[in-house]
Image (cartoon, coloured by chain):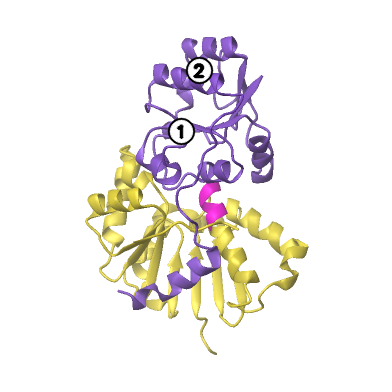
Chain colours: A purple, B yellow
């Protein structure tokens, strides 16, 4: 069984509704894929028994689920950064996400992309990932990260640069 | 009494992602040897996600090496109210006599020099609901020529410049460790 983990609150742009579709349910059942979501039953329900609602989790617990998942699933239409994408790359996890500027900037060509908001494209991508699941493509961060201490030092001296 | 040098303003921070990013900076300031001589005030609100992270940190053994020049100031939950925040950001700027102010929540101070806004609210660019259009208007009113805006990624920076016509921006990716 393959496990996909999507750590996101229930906000409109996070697109959990993409998963509430008969075609997605059929795809998950056929491929024996489970999706774990960090929302609760009171937020939203799904007809598919392959979608598991974990409720709100601590960051540590989220990392535990990500470490033990087959891939990160990330459905958001916009993000300022996309922390789970960075975390997935640091854990060498594959990533299934929309082909958008924010995902491309962080992970380049490494994710399994689908067309944003397209159920058919998402299903096709999940099928593709399942086919490669024996040796999937890990997501790779394309930019180096500035150490946070250096970032703070940069901030407090920025006004001298302008 | 000598005034503090730096202010890390996180009064409005309550989202999970924004709290994690802000807390990473706070922890870095608290534990960094190179920053130990800097005097920093960290301002946040009670009952927020950030408050939980700070409380856990202060109770943990990790804070044993805590920089004594860092002071935490926790204000009541009402301080997170957007209207209160907007008014505060409009009038309080001239009273902040710090060498540098780094603002981590959504709104910058209108009349404050030596200020950096850490911009990480994508709804201020992409969300077209009525609520966020009102917030965008408030954001427009608070932008000032002296403000410097840090934005995590270049795509967000480009979208920000398109949306607000504001070009005094800096962008680079940093870690959270």
Estimate how packed mark 2 is, as few (under 14), some (14 to 19) or many (20 or more) residues with alpha carbons within 10 Å.
Answer: some
Question: Where residue B133 sits: x, y (%)?
Answer: 29, 44
Residue beneath the point at 53% across and 32% down: A137
Q: Which mark is residue A127?
A: 2
* Label 2 secondary element: helix
Residue B88 visible, this orientation: no
Whether residue A13 can be seen here: yes
Q: Which residues are magenta?
A: B16-21
Q: Position of residue A33 (x, y in %)?
A: 60, 18
Secondary structure beneath label 1: helix
Give the percent coordinates (x, y) of residue B32: 62, 72
Which quarter shows the C terminus of chain B? bottom right
Tag 1 subunit: A
Position of residue A20 relative to residue A26, above or below, is below
Q: CA distance from mark 1 to mark 2?
A: 21 Å
Residue nearer the viewer, B24 or A68 = A68
* Magenta stretch, overall SS: helix
Which residue is depicted at the point 54% across and 42% down? A84
Of callouts 1 and 2, which one flags the residue occurring earlier in the amino acid sequence? 1
Q: Which mark is residue A14?
A: 1
Residue at the (55%, 53%) spot, across then down: B19
Q: Could you tell me which chain the residue with mark 2 belongs to?
A: A
Magenta stretch: includes residue A103: no
- Residue reaching furthest bottom? B1
Instruction: Tell me where residue B50 appears, x and y as whole percent.
Output: 59, 55
Q: Are marks 1 and 2 in contact (CB under 8 Å)?
A: no
Judged left or right of residue A128, residue B157 is: left
Residue B19 on the magenta segment: yes
């Amino acid at each position: 069984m393959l496990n996909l983990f999507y750590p996101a609150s229930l906000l409109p742009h996070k697109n959990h509704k993409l998963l509430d579709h008969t075609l997605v349910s059929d795809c998950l059942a056929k491929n024996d894929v489970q999706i774990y979501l960090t929302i609760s039953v009171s937020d939203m329900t799904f007809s598919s028994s392959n979608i598991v609602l974990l409720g709100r989790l601590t960051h540590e617990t989220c990392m535990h689920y990500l470490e033990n998942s087959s891939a990160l699933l990330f459905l958001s239409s916009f993000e300022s950064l996309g922390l789970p994408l960075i975390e997935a790359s640091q854990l060498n996890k594959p990533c299934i996400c929309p082909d958008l500027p924010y995902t491309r900037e962080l992970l380049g060509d490494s994710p399994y992309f689908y067309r944003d908001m397209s159920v058919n494209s998402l299903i096709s991508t999940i099928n593709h990932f399942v086919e490669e699941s024996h040796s999937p493509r890990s997501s790779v961060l394309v930019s180096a990260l500035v150490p946070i201490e250096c970032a703070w030092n940069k901030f407090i001296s920025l006004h001298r640069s302008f | 009494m000598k005034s503090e040098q730096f202010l890390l303003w996180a009064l409005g921070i309550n989202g999970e992602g924004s709290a994690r990013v802000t807390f990473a900076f706070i922890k870095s300031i608290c534990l960094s040897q190179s920053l130990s001589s800097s005097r920093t005030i960290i301002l946040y609100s009670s009952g927020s996600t950030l408050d939980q992270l700070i409380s856990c940190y202060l109770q943990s053994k990790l804070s044993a090496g805590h920089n004594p020049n860092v002071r935490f100031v926790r204000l009541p939950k009402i301080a997170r109210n957007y209207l209160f925040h907007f008014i505060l950001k409009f009038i309080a700027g001239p009273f902040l006599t710090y060498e540098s102010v780094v603002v981590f929540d959504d709104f910058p101070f209108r009349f404050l020099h030596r200020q950096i806004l850490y911009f990480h609210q994508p709804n201020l660019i992409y969300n077209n609901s009525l609520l966020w259009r009102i917030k965008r208007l408030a954001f427009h009113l608070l932008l000032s020529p002296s403000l410097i805006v840090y934005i995590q990624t270049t795509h967000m920076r480009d979208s920000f410049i398109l949306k607000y016509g504001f070009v005094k921006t800096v962008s680079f990716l940093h870690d959270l460790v």
